[in-house]
């Protein structure tokens, strides 16, 4: 799909869903360098005793940074969060199983070691991942990421006749969208909410970029239905406003 098409679809998607945060694009690359996508760079904290550090606390933080800038990341940039490194395909389960952050999550009861093999992860190890505003992506994205509130998630789910809803860890919706071709919404996870600072009202949504035209068309077709139902519900509820309280 041409970059101009993604730009137009991004604008229409923002308009029809009344998004407060514009869509971002995420491209999994088999090349380390991407023209017009500078490395994320920046200083990194000293590694933990098990060697973890990175450009940000967790892979999901890149979703917030990509709202207004295009950049490229490599495995080392994601390295502070073992869960994100695993779900994004940078590391195998065996490479993260002995990390202290995994031990902390398992020790808290948040997740069991037996659960990890069932967590979706990107199958092919990328050389890099490029992030940026969807309308300015220098390469074709694999995933379109949206930050939704409950009503926007409802409208999307209704228009498409159902989407996949997921829980923790939030970042595994990347694999569901990229490799599974499914549209997935996560209710979020405490690990990600604290690290990203995302609003308590926000949900994350991953859409396979190849399906974006289909998604926008479905939202467009369903918009009049939503308006009619809203108008009926408002008019019907107004009847009760005329009843005096006891």
Image (cartoon, grey):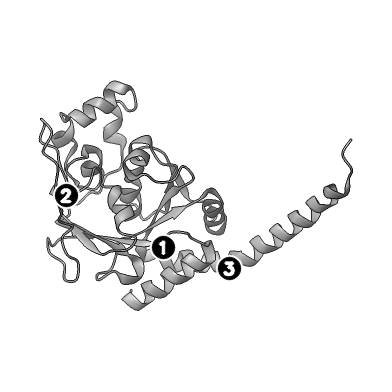
Mark number, residue 133: none
Please indicate, yes or no, whether residue 30 appears anywhere in the rendered image. Answer: yes
Residue under the point 25% across and 38% down: 83
Residue for badge 1: 22
Query: Along the horizontal axis of the image, is 243 left or right of 115?
Result: right
Camera-near label (3 vs 2) is 2
Residue under the point 31% across and 71% down: 136
SS for callout 1: loop
SS for callout 2: helix
Percent from the top left, x then y, of residue 59? 26, 47
Query: Disc 3 to disc 2, how far (Cα)?
Result: 41 Å
Indicate which disc, 3 or 2, sits on the residue closer to the N terminus.
Answer: 2
Q: Are marks 2 and 1 in contact (CB under 8 Å)?
A: no
Please indicate, yes or no, whether residue 113 appears anywhere in the rendered image. Answer: no
Vertical order, 239 against 71 (above or below): above
In front of the other: 237 or 87? 237
Residue for badge 2: 77
Vertical order, 188 against 218 (above or below): above
In front of the other: 135 or 89? 135
The local crowd at label 3, few if under 14, some if 14 to 19, many if 20 or more residues have their Cα within 10 Å, is few
The quadrant of the picture occupied by the C terminus is: top right
Residue for badge 3: 221
SS for callout 3: helix
Percent from the top left, x then y, of residue 68? 32, 63
Q: Are marks 3 and 1 in contact (CB under 8 Å)?
A: no
């Amino acid at each position: 799909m041409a970059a101009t098409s993604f730009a137009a679809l991004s604008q229409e998607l923002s308009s029809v869903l009344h998004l407060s945060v514009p869509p971002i694009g995420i491209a999994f690359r088999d090349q380390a360098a991407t023209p017009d996508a500078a490395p994320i760079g920046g200083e990194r904290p000293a590694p933990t005793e098990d060697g973890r550090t990175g450009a940000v606390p967790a892979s999901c933080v890149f979703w917030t940074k990509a709202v207004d800038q295009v950049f490229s990341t490599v495995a080392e940039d994601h390295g502070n969060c073992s869960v994100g490194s695993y779900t994004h395909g940078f590391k195998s389960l065996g490479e993260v199983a002995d990390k202290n952050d995994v031990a902390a999550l398992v020790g808290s009861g948040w997740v069991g070691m037996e659960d990890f093999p069932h967590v979706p992860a990107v199958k092919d190890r990328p050389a890099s991942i490029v992030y940026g505003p969807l309308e300015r992506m220098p390469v074709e994205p694999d995933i379109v990421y949206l930050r939704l509130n409950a009503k926007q998630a409802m409208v999307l789910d209704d228009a498409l006749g159902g989407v996949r809803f997921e829980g923790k860890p939030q970042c595994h919706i990347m694999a569901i969208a990229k490799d599974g071709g499914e549209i997935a919404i996560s209710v979020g996870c405490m690990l990600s909410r604290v690290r990203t600072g995302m609003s308590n009202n926000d949900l994350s949504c991953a859409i396979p970029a190849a399906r974006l035209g289909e998604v926008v068309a479905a939202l467009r077709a369903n918009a009049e239905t939503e308006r009619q139902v809203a108008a009926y519900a408002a008019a019907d509820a107004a009847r009760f406003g005329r009843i005096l309280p006891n």
